Amino acid sequence: MHATQSDGGGLRIGVLAARAGTSADTVRYYERLGLLGPPPRTASGYRIYQDEELRRLQFIRRAKRLGFSLDDIRGLLGLAEEGECRPLRRQVAELLRREIVVCETKLTEIAAFKATLETYHQLAVQGENEPACSCASFPATCACLPIQIQEDGPWRR
């Protein structure tokens, strides 16, 4: 018997994980979540996987690379198990459309944050030759950081 396989030709968890490009911990995690079924075990307790589980794990990894959540993937796996490509493709297209919207929102937020950073950068450059402000004592009004924090609320005294 080879150290990474069973007598029946199945794969032990480390080999399965390596072939799928993931870790054994991830495989166990997917099993706990029900994304992978519980595998049969050898008499000594080793999990033994077949090519079907490898293909399923590769499907999960591909879906993760597209940004799909594990709940999304669970739904896709259910559709894939039905064997009908059209509903699966329709769902993939819908999920991809949703991911595009999420990306567009993030890009808008990042662009706004970048513009804010550029403004603060200009303020920092303008203040480079200002007189010292006693920043070693970390006063709230230190001019070295070109931003102020609004401290509102009952905790402020």
Image (cartoon, rainbow, N blue to C red):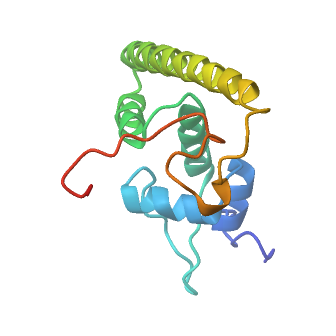
Report how many numbered discs are placed on residues in the image.
Answer: 0
Taking the spot 69% from the left edge, 66% from the top edge, the residue there is 14
Furthest toward the left, the residue is 154
Q: Which of 45 and 131 is in front in this view?
A: 131
Instruction: State left or right for residue 124 relative to residue 30.
Output: right
Taking the spot 49% from the left edge, 50% from the top edge, the residue there is 140
From the viewer's perspective, is residue 98 above or below residue 66? above
Q: Nearer the viewer, residue 122 or 114?
A: 122
From the viewer's perspective, is residue 124 above or below residue 114? below
Residue 12 visible at all: no
From the viewer's perspective, is residue 39 above or below residue 114? below
Q: Which of 129 and 76 is in front in this view?
A: 129
From the viewer's perspective, is residue 33 above or below residue 144? below
Taking the spot 40% from the left edge, 31% from the top edge, the residue there is 76
Instruction: State left or right for residue 21 relative to residue 92.
Output: right
Taking the spot 40% from the left edge, 62% from the top edge, the residue there is 32
Residue 46: image x %, image y %? 59, 77
Residue 4: image x %, image y %? 76, 71
Furthest toward the front, the residue is 131
Residue 125: image x %, image y %? 75, 26
Residue 141 visible at all: yes
- Quadrant containing the C terminus in the rendered view: bottom left
Residue 110: image x %, image y %? 55, 22
Furthest toward the bottom, the residue is 44
- Quadrant containing the N terminus in the rendered view: bottom right
Residue 16, quarter of the rendered image: bottom right
Instruction: State left or right for residue 53 relative to residue 125.
Output: left
Q: Nearer the viewer, residue 1 or 36?
A: 36
